Image: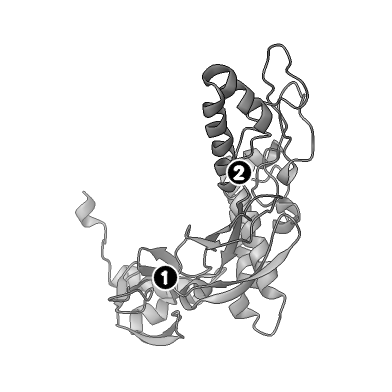
């Protein structure tokens, strides 16, 4: 993945507000629902969200700047102090062999190795115990324990995937790229929650003599340019003109299942909340609701006619909406 700063088009010393603003503009511009004829829109949108997951989180941003995590949020392996290990372990990690001390300990007498383990048991408890130790070694290998290193290798792999709110609701199929470069098509079930994990058995790393690990996919839901998720409910801010608020109007309101018309009564104040029942997130049992909060937006710039009208209204119809504040 590209450098998150490059993806969002901000400088490395950009403020949190500048990063948030850049993300919102790009997310709105490249949202798949607004670019249905562009097959690359979903990939760009996912890249934008992945970059925001790093730079929009103060802790992750510092970790990235220090080189502790990469552009996908995965830890960068720094090695062990003092060295001494040999390279070539799974996933780029170094493998360390622990040797048993004492006379006769050679290159083949690693701690937990088959011969070394049997010798220790034989010297302490006799042949019968040694035979039991050999049996334990066989069982350990069958269960994935590696007696050459003294550890059971962790062959599971973890990756994250970002989906849009709409994709999380209706389900989708997306392609995920593994650290090894392998790509897989993954079905995301309808109704998936943020942070939920999907396990694909046998799709992790492999090693001779061991069962293949699993692939664990953590699903993240990208922030929506319009809706905010609150449990099963959704929240939306609805801009209104001054004349719509005063005179009343019918305005189009987006929902997850398509736009609807909402009747705005006369003299609607900014901040009034309308509840659209069942227009939230679909869940087992009862669906959530959509809460629409009105925001009165004045025209940009100076409007002499509007100002003159307001001056006349102020002089002839004064009122104080803050009278109860003392």
On the image, the x and y values in percent for residue 62 come to 63, 38
Q: Mark 1 points at which residue?
A: 236
Assess disc 1: are there few (<14), some (14-19) or many (≥20) residues with their C-alpha within 10 Å of its C-alpha.
many
Q: Nearer the viewer, residue 131 or 198?
A: 131
Residue 12: image tag: none
Task: Name the residue located 59 percent from the left edge and 55 percent from the top edge.
Answer: 20
Is residue 121 positioned above or below 272 on the image? above
Left or right placement of residue 124 versus residue 99 in this view: left
Assess disc 2: are there few (<14), some (14-19) or many (≥20) residues with their C-alpha within 10 Å of its C-alpha.
some
CB atoms at circles 1 and 2 under 8 Å apart? Answer: no
Left or right placement of residue 145 versus residue 91 in this view: left
Q: Callout 2: helix, strand or loop?
A: helix
Residue 45 visible (yes or no): yes
On the image, the x and y values in percent for residue 202 come to 61, 61
Residue 304 visible (yes or no): no
Q: Which colour scheme is used?
A: one colour
**How many numbered callouts?**
2
Q: Quote the CA–CA distance across marks 1 and 2.
A: 56 Å
Task: Name the residue located 52 percent from the left edge and 28 percent from the top edge.
Answer: 128
Q: Nearer the viewer, residue 278 or 236?
A: 278
Q: Which of 291 and 97 is in front in this view?
A: 97
On the image, the x and y values in percent for residue 309 come to 41, 75
Quarter-wise, where is residue 252 in the image?
A: bottom left
User: Which mark lies nearer to you, 1 or 2?
Assistant: 2
Q: Quadrant of the N terminus?
A: bottom right
Q: Which of 78 and 294 is in front in this view?
A: 78
Residue 141: image tag: 2
Return the disc, 1 or 2, that comes first in the chain's sequence: 2
């Amino acid at each position: 993945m590209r450098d998150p700063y490059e993806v969002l088009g901000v400088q490395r010393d950009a403020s949190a507000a500048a990063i948030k603003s850049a993300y919102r503009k790009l997310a709105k511009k490249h949202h798949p629902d607004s670019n249905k004829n562009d097959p690359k829109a979903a990939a760009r949108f996912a890249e934008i969200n992945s970059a925001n997951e790093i730079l929009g989180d103060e802790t992750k941003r510092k970790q990235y700047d220090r080189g502790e995590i990469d552009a996908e949020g995965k830890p960068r392996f720094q090695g062990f102090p003092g060295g001494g290990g040999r390279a070539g372990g799974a996933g780029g990690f170094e493998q360390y062999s622990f040797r048993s001390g004492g006379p006769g300990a050679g290159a083949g007498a690693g701690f937990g190795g088959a011969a070394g383990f049997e010798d220790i048991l034989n010297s302490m408890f006799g042949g019968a115990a040694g035979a039991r130790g050999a049996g334990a070694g066989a069982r350990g290998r069958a269960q994935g324990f590696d007696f050459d290193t003294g550890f059971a290798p962790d062959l599971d792999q973890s990756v994250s995937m970002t989906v849009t709110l709409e994709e999380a609701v209706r389900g989708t199929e997306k392609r995920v790229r593994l650290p090894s470069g392998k790509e897989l098509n993954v079905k995301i079930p309808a109704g998936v929650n943020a942070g939920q994990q999907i396990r694909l058995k046998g799709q992790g790393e492999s090693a001779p003599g061991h069962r293949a690990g699993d692939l664990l996919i953590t699903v993240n839901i990208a922030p929506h340019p319009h809706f905010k998720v609150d449990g099963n409910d959704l929240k939306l801010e609805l801009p209104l003109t001054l004349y719509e608020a005063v005179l009343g109007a019918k305005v189009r309101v987006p929902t997850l299942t398509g736009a609807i018309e909402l009747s705005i009564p006369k003299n609607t104040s900014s901040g009034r909340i309308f509840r659209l029942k069942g227009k939230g997130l679909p869940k087992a049992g009862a669906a959530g609701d959509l809460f629409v909060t009105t925001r009165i937006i004045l025209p940009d710039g100076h409007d002499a006619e509007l100002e003159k009208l307001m001056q006349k209204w102020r002089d002839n119809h004064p009122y104080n909406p803050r009278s109860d504040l003392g």
